[in-house]
Amino acid sequence: MDFVNDLWAEVKRSWGIIMRAKVAFFGMAVLGAVTAWGVCSFYDGKVGDLKAAADESVIKAQKGIIDGIKEERDRANRDNEKLTKQVDDLKIYRGKDAPPLKKTAQILASQIHEFIEKCKDWKGKPQVDSEYAERYRDRFGRRVVLVRDDLDQNGEHSDVLDGLIRDWELGRKVGLDQAKSIADEIENMAKVLPD
C-alpha cells in the first residue's frame, strides 16, 4: 500500500510537469496500454496454444490406447477364428441317424482291413511305408481315437489298443501289422457291445 501512496504523491507533485507534456504523457499512456494489451494477447495466445497442445496430446494418447485395444481385439478375433476352425475340424458329424457304436466300430475295423488289403506291397519298402502311414493317419487316425474314446465311455477299455495308438502316433511302430492289430482290437471290443 505504501508503494501506491508514494506513486500517487509523486504524480501530485509532478502534475504541473505532466500537464505541460500532455502529448508525451498521453502518448506514453497509450503506448503502455497498447503494450499491456499486446502482452496480454500474447499471453492468451500462448496459453491457448499450450492448452491446444495439451488437448492434442491427450487426444493422441487416447487414440493410442484405442488403437492398442483395437489391435488386441483383432488379435483375439483371429485367435477365436483359429480355435473355432480347430474345434470344427475336430468335430465329427453324429446325427440322429448315426449307427450305434457297435456298428460304427465294426465299419471302421472293416475299412482298415480293406485299406491293408490294398496296401500289400507296403511291407518292407521304407519309402512306401511313410506314404501309406500318412494315408492311414489321414483317413483313420482321428476316427480310431474317437471310436476308442466312445468304447471306453461305454465300458470297453483296452490297454493294448491304447498302446498301439500311442506307438503309431509317436511313430515307434508304423506298419501293416500295427494297423491290422488296431483294427482287430477294435473289432474284438465291438463284439461285446449290444446291437
Image (cartoon, rainbow, N blue to C red):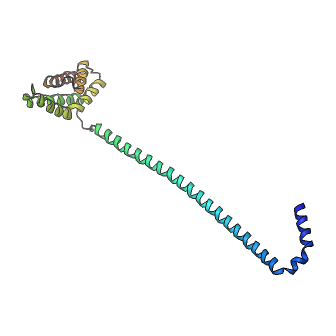
**Placement of 109 over or under 40, stated as above or below:** above
Q: Nearer the viewer, residue 192 or 36?
A: 36
Residue furthest top as drawn: 159
Q: Position of residue 140 (x, y in %)?
A: 20, 32
Whether residue 13 is visible, yes or no, is: yes
**Placement of 18 over or under 101, stated as above or below:** below
> Residue at left 88%, top 77%?
17
Q: Nearer the viewer, residue 195 or 14?
A: 14
> Residue at left 70%, top 67%?
39
Q: Position of residue 63 (x, y in %)?
A: 51, 54
Left or right placement of residue 173 versus residue 61 in this view: left
Quarter assignment of residue 95? top left
**Placement of 189 over or under 100, stated as above or below:** above
Left or right placement of residue 120 versus residue 165 in this view: left
> Residue at left 88%, top 64%?
4
User: For the N terminus, which image quadrant?
Assistant: bottom right
Q: Nearer the viewer, residue 43 or 51?
A: 43
Left or right placement of residue 167 versus residue 120 in this view: right
Residue furthest left as drawn: 121
Whether residue 1 is visible, yes or no, is: no
Q: Position of residue 195 (x, y in %)?
A: 22, 27
